Amino acid sequence: MAEKEEEAGVNHVVLLPGPMQGNVNSMMKLAQLLALHHFHVTFLTTDFIHRRLHRFADIQALSQTYPNLELKSISDGLPDDHPRSDNALADLYSFMNSHAKPLIRDILVSQTAAKPKVTCLIGDGFLGGLTADEADEVGIPVIHFRAISASCFWALFCAPNLFESNELPIKGEEDMDRMITTLPGMENILRCRDLPGFYRGTESNLVEPLKSTVFDCHQTLRARGVILNTFEDLDGPLLSQMRLMFPRVFAVGPLHAHLNSGRVFDAKPTPSMSSFWEVDRSCLTWLDSQPLKSVLYVSFGSITTITRERLMEFWYGLVNSKKRFLWVIRPDMVAGEDNNDRVPAEVEEGTKERGFIVGWAPQEEVLEHKAIGGFLTHSGWNSTLESLVAGVPMICWPYFADQQINSRREEFLKSAKAMAMLAHKSVSPGGSSYSSFHDLIQYIKSTGR
Ligand code: UDP
């Protein structure tokens, strides 16, 4: 016990997630794991997210379970009513880059009798340049965390080489099925259409959004290491390539499986520790009354928006499939519409026979439920990992960012069940992610000495 207290007193890690639900979810798991290993942890979000967490996540349970994990926030520089999802992400990103530096610096250098000095910053690679600059300035080691898939990060990182070898740019629609042959560790796996969305429509050089994304990926070279939410059996060949480039690659995922290992699902409700929306648990009761593996779970994550026409198309497809379905329609999912009228009356009525609609589901628990037989997903990385760990086969409807590449990887995987076993093995004692997480802990401790 004395040793534990001593450890908690020495090592103070600040985690700075990108301001999106998926990034906050995965970095919160990492924060919980570090807190369980007796680090003093500051989880630093924007004021906007901080308020949502206080409204919808079980902060009381979080602070009771992890007394050494503290939530703090800074302004993102945008007015409260400014949109912060989908296309508005670019605004958010540039505002944070220009506005947040001094605020982050204050947190990094602050020290009180009760709180030890910060010894390590784990910054979201989404804010790569920002976190690297700040850490350099105050002399604190920074490790980058990548919430996107390793394959997407690597495909973006290698963009300049793909242009150099004339594999890029993509030459229009007719070029989409061409194989990419020179991406190290992923040769002949990706077609042009599977590259991250940023690659679309590029001409002779890197265009702006791709250029700045690639620039951010290269900022990770300035970090002491990179943490990836993946595991060796899933991404081994490209992790080997990355290790030639980065000093330390910690493949510690799937993080939620790491945190849950040993926990029995359905035994007791899991409080949501990082939700931005109110979790509707009534769908679990509905699932309890459905036959084994009979329900298709449909969710497009936290950012994707669709038109009302697209929503109706999906709905007709789901109803006409005659399968049971559980569908998440977020309050802000239909672009440009009044939040309170999110589910058209005809959809609500026509769904009752075989379907169930919620505004936000306890997704991890849903995917582990025995009634779930498949997942129609937008292929966000967290959703992909959660489905993979639960052994649920996916039908992919990739929307943007890393989703095209994630959905392509799915085609190369072994059966859902076999992948689930490998994922669980990786976070069990002796498994690759288990060992990598312990390497990470040792490394962070060494930075505090
Ligand atoms: N999620 C959830 N309830 C829902 C829909 C999504 O808890 O009804 C969670 C999901 O478990 C995942 C995250 O939101 O952890 C979405 O992240 P992902 O990377 O899949 O997609 P993004 O939202 O970043 O597009």
Image: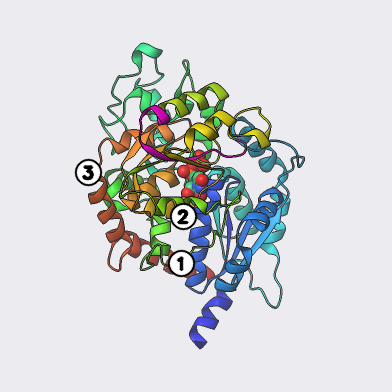
**Nearer the viewer's eye, disc 1 or disc 2?**
2
Q: What residue appears at the point 48 percent right and 20 percent down from the top-left corner?
A: 205
Query: Looking at the image, can residue 338 be seen?
Result: yes
Residue nearest the viewer, comparing 374 with 236:
374
Residue 441: image x %, image y %?
44, 67
Q: How far across and down, in percent of the image, does residue 320 sit?
A: 38, 27
Q: How far apart are marks 1 and 3 (CA)?
A: 31 Å
Residue 414 in the figure: left or right of residue 144: left
The residue that label 3 is drawn on is 414
Q: In this view, does 107 lie above or below 238?
A: below
Residue nearest the observer in this picture, 127 or 119: 127
Q: What residue type is labelled 1?
A: Lys
Colour convention of the picture: rainbow
Q: What element carries label 1?
A: loop
Query: Could you tell which of marks 1 and 2 lies nearer the N-terminus?
Result: 1
Say which amino acid is labelled 3: Lys
> At 64% from the left edge and 70% from the top edge, which residue is drawn?
117
Name the residue tied to disc 2: 285
Task: Tell me if mark 3 has few (under 14), some (14-19) or many (20+) residues whose alpha carbon lies within 10 angstroms of its own.
Answer: few
Q: For the residues labelled 1 and 3, say whether their Cβ atoms are less than 8 Å apart.
A: no
In the image, the segment drawn in magenta is: 318-332
Q: Is mark 2 on a helix, strand or loop?
A: helix
